[in-house]
């Protein structure tokens, strides 16, 4: 039973790491484009171009509903936010730049925590 306890403890500690990482992303000055889902009624063309929308509030809901299997599935959704941003926005736009800054910040966070 030690082995089973060990696996579940890792899941819990991995989930705790995800919550801390998400809180740090949300606190970043350039997080504003990513805090809530893109409103495709306002942002024309978004629903057609971006097949898998993702944002920090959706990631938080998924975390709270235990929908991430481990740290890697959480990281995949965070990277999806930045990949969608690069696909839809020019690099030299405010939101495009925010996406690049946030991706770099997240990458550095991950290397700090390893
Ligand atoms: C990622 N992405 C975002 C937008 C976009 O226009 N997003 C809304 C910006 C306006 N939203 C805010 O300013 C805001 C939202 C929540 C908050 F707590 C504080 C400020 C457009 C294309 C795209 O690819």
Image (cartoon, grey):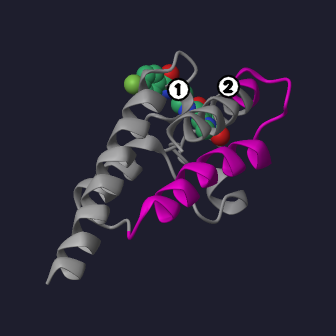
Circles 1 and 2 in contact, beta carbons < 8 Å: yes
Disc 1: CA contacts within 10 A as few (<14), some (14-19) or many (>=20): some
Measured in 3D between alpha carbons, the distance from the residue under mark 1 to the one under mark 2, in whole angstroms, is 7 Å
Q: Label 2 CB, ligand 1: below 8 Å? A: yes
Residue span colored magenta = 69-98
The disc, 1 or 2, on the residue closer to the chain's N-terminal end is: 1
Q: Position of residue 10 (x, y in %)?
A: 31, 63
Report helix, strand or loop for mark 1: loop
Q: Is residue 97 magenta?
A: yes
- Numbered circle sitting on residue 20: none
Residue occupying image coordinates x 74% and y 32%: 100
Q: Is residue 17 above or below residue 66?
A: above
Residue occupying image coordinates x 53% and y 15%: 29
Q: Is residue 19 left or right of residue 108?
A: left
Residue toward you, 64 or 105: 105
Magenta stretch secondary structure, dominant:
helix
* Residue hosting label 2: 98
Residue at the extreme front: 2
On the question of residue 57 being in view, the answer is yes
Q: Position of residue 57 (x, y in %)?
A: 37, 43
Residue toward you, 107 or 2: 2
Disc 2: CA contacts within 10 A as few (<14), some (14-19) or many (>=20): many
Report helix, strand or loop for mark 2: helix
Residue occupying image coordinates x 52% and y 26%: 31
Q: Position of residue 20 (x, y in %)?
A: 35, 37
Residue occupying image coordinates x 37% and y 32%: 23
* Residue hosting label 1: 31
Q: Is residue 51 left or right of residue 10?
A: right
């Amino acid at each position: 039973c030690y082995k089973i306890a060990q696996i579940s403890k890792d899941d819990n500690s991995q989930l705790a790491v995800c919550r801390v990482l998400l809180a740090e992303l949300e606190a970043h000055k350039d997080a504003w484009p990513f805090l809530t889902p893109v409103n495709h009624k306002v942002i024309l063309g978004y629903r057609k171009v971006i097949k898998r929308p993702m944002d920090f509030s959706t990631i938080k809901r998924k975390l709270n509903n235990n929908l991430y299997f481990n740290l890697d599935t959480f990281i995949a959704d965070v990277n999806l936010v930045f990949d969608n941003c690069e696909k839809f926005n020019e690099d030299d736009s405010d939101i495009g730049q925010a996406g690049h800054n946030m991706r770099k910040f997240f990458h550095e966070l991950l290397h700090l925590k390893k």
